[in-house]
Amino acid sequence: MRLRFNCSIFRQVSALGFLLLTVPLDVLAQAPGLPIIIPEAVFSSLGRVTGATTQQRIMDRGSIIRIKLGDDQDRLPADTEVVLFRQGLRLQLPGGDRTLGVLAVPVGRGRTLQRLTENQEIADPNEPGVAWVRIQSVRQEVSRGDSLMTVSEAQRWEPKECDAPVGNNAAPTPAASPGDARVIGLVSSDVLADPLSTSLDLVVISGGCLTGLRTGQAVSLWRPPVTTHGRKLDQPVEARDNNSSSVLDDNPGITQTQVPGHRIGSGLVVAAYPNVALVRIRVATQPVQINDQARSMLLRNQP
């Protein structure tokens, strides 16, 4: 029996292998990582993207962008790897009585130009307080106003062990109960994601290690009980003195119904800080909203 050689499959496999070989390995290794939480004062002092050499509004991979550093006399060393962050999201406890930091979402990576390239490409390469960076990889389009941080600085704020505080002067927080874990931020690595849809891939929940959450742990997301208002089938009572402050008193036909809480999805903890945790959504039957509850759950493959 003769074996028939399928040339079409061979061509497809060869094309796929060629495509993988042509992708630079440094681009694959330098993909932007997870968001990090840093103090607001540190985030406000970071360098900002002011534009590109081609004066385009959106900068893509390969573009040379101009960075205005926080210090007017500062200069970044040549060939320094940097991370680009989107505008920060201030994280607060559900009550709003305490700020936990700023969530910096990485959108790309790059390197500062070498001195020879800087002299060839930039008209004024020695301008103080300015750095020039070539974008090497992007998750979202880089735009004016994005912030910049060196890789070594970004690694300083990555979550370590659960007993490590966020920041140098973080005030101690009393232990929280598992019911205190709530969604306080919505994040997405897709610039076109709709916050009112189920396409969000990351959410920020409060509590973190204080509620027993650890990296790799599964959590379920729940919609808390809500009160809805409706009207009975009988005719409404109208009066001339009706106003917005006495709607329920003037209209006895309005009813209040307590809708019980229900499960809306599940996710996996990908980063755990002492007071905050990042959860990657696995399944979502409804759009996740602020103040949704998060409960710990055990997977079969977990000890």
Image (spheres, grey):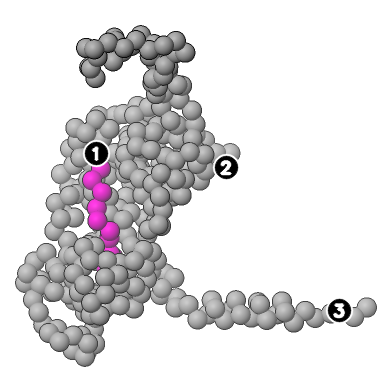
Cα–Cα span, label 3 and label 2: 43 Å
The reply to whether residue 133 is in sight is no
| Amino acid type, callout 3 | Leu
The kind of secondary structure element at disc 1 is strand
Q: Is residue 216 above or below residue 121?
A: above
Say which residue appears at 50% left-offset and 81% top-offset: 22
- Magenta span: helix, strand or loop, mainly? strand
| Amino acid type, callout 2 | Asn
Mark earlier in primary sequence (1, 3): 3
Discs 3/2, front: 3
Q: Which residues are magenta?
A: 81-92
Left or right, 134 with reference to 281: left
- Rendered image: mark on residue 92: 1
Q: Position of residue 48 (x, y in %)?
A: 18, 65
**CB under 8 Å between discs 3 and 2:** no
Discs 1/3, front: 1
Q: Position of residue 89 (x, y in %)?
A: 26, 49
